Image (spheres, rainbow, N blue to C red):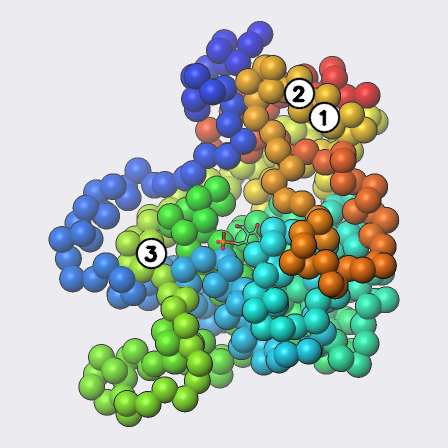
Amino acid sequence: MSFKDLPIMQDKKKGVLLFYPYVSKKTPINIKKKLSGRWLGQGPMVDKFENDFKKKFARKYSVIATGSGTDSLHLAYILAGLKKGDEVITTIFTCTATNIPMLYMDLKIKFADIERDTMNISIDSVKKLITRKTKAIVCVHYGGLPCNMDALQKICKQKRIILIEDAAHALGAKYRKKPIGSISDFSTFSFQAIKHFTTGDGGMLTIKDKQLEDKAKRIRWFGIDRKKKQQGIWKNDVHEIGYKYQMTDLSATMGCDALRDFNKIYKHRKKIYNTYLQELSPNSRVRCIHDYDKKKEHGAWLFTIAVNNKDFVQKKLREHSIETNQVHFRNDRYSIFKKFVKGKKFPNMDYLENKYLVLPLHHKVTVQTAKYISKLINKYAK
Ligand SMILES: Cc1ncc(COP(=O)(O)O)c(C=O)c1O
């Protein structure tokens, strides 16, 4: 059987793509309406998207829609009060977006190693990095798998450290039945093209401390209180350095439409995720990056395997028109982070570096396709 025989392929010429953007069927009509209305930039749809998101993922937390996941992270670091020279512990394995805002803020980055089974931040490694100067820990729920939040919360509570979750992969994920986004001091999400759904580009920040909400909204918009300005009661002064981190109404329209479809999107992704897990986990030559811990509900954004002959498996899959990739890379390979990693060791990252591979997982991948891909992996993994 080749990919052409499979009933639903997303791209007949290119085969099975690794990612495919999700946009609701209703969006073209709603965007068309929006284009002839008053609000294109930040307007009432942004408020609606925030409210809808809050009900689903943030419970009592404040929610702030932004222009990207990166914006949300930068905003979180500012709101956390991080200052030049503060030490922040973060993971070595993530999208550079997690750590780049720290460079803008002159923070001292302390990279932690990952766990071999999950590729999430290693708690043992975090513990070794804590000093009296540690102000924050940033964890990333890699692929959508929640980190060990009990352990991270315990450390942060004991040492009075701020906990920030980069949840760009983890929409829909839960920890102890609580949605990711309603647990730590700050959590950030991304609606960039290849995430669970897209708003073109966009992000969300959830905040535990309600008192920070107004400040977050001001900093999102140059330091100006937009509400007061629109009501004509704003005292014309800016006393906080803000920037342009806002979401537009066009993006929020896409976001509201996609949120309505979210349960369906998530259910499908879980089905494909579980198919890979079922087909690949019995094979001792394939390590599925997964955790069977019942406290954790996976967000099913990425399905990642680790195999000793990664390049060969990837080549064989490519020959069968199946796209795979490593997606994220260890951050110490990038020159911008070099000064923070001199002489540092990351044995688990070293171990996995040339082994891990991300498989196609999105709304156009069928169970049959996932089984076919698994069969090829089981055949070629050594
Ligand atoms: C872990 C992680 N954090 C942050 C981001 C940045 O999000 P955005 O592209 O929306 O800025 C991404 C990916 O895009 C990511 O994978």
- Looking at the image, residue 229 sits to the left or right of residue 167; the answer is left
The furthest residue to the left: 36
Q: Which residue is identified by label 1?
A: 311
Pointers 2 and 1 in contact (CB under 8 A)? yes
Q: Position of residue 46 (x, y in %)?
A: 32, 63
Circle nearer the N terminus (1, 3): 3
Residue kind at label 3, given as amino acid type = Ala
Mark 2 is surrounded, within 10 Å at the Cα level, by few (under 14), some (14 to 19) or many (20 or more) other residues, namely some
The residue shown at (44%, 24%) is 10
- The CA distance from mark 1 to mark 3 is 40 Å
The residue shown at (82%, 52%) is 346
Q: Which mark is residue 252?
A: 3
Q: Quadrant of the C terminus?
A: top right
Mark 3 is surrounded, within 10 Å at the Cα level, by few (under 14), some (14 to 19) or many (20 or more) other residues, namely many
Q: Classify mark 1 as within 8 Å of ligand 1 or not, answering yes or no.
A: no
The residue shown at (73%, 47%) is 119
Q: Position of residue 343 (x, y in %)?
A: 85, 59
| SS state under label 3 | helix
The residue shown at (59%, 15%) is 320
Q: Which residue is identified by label 2?
A: 315
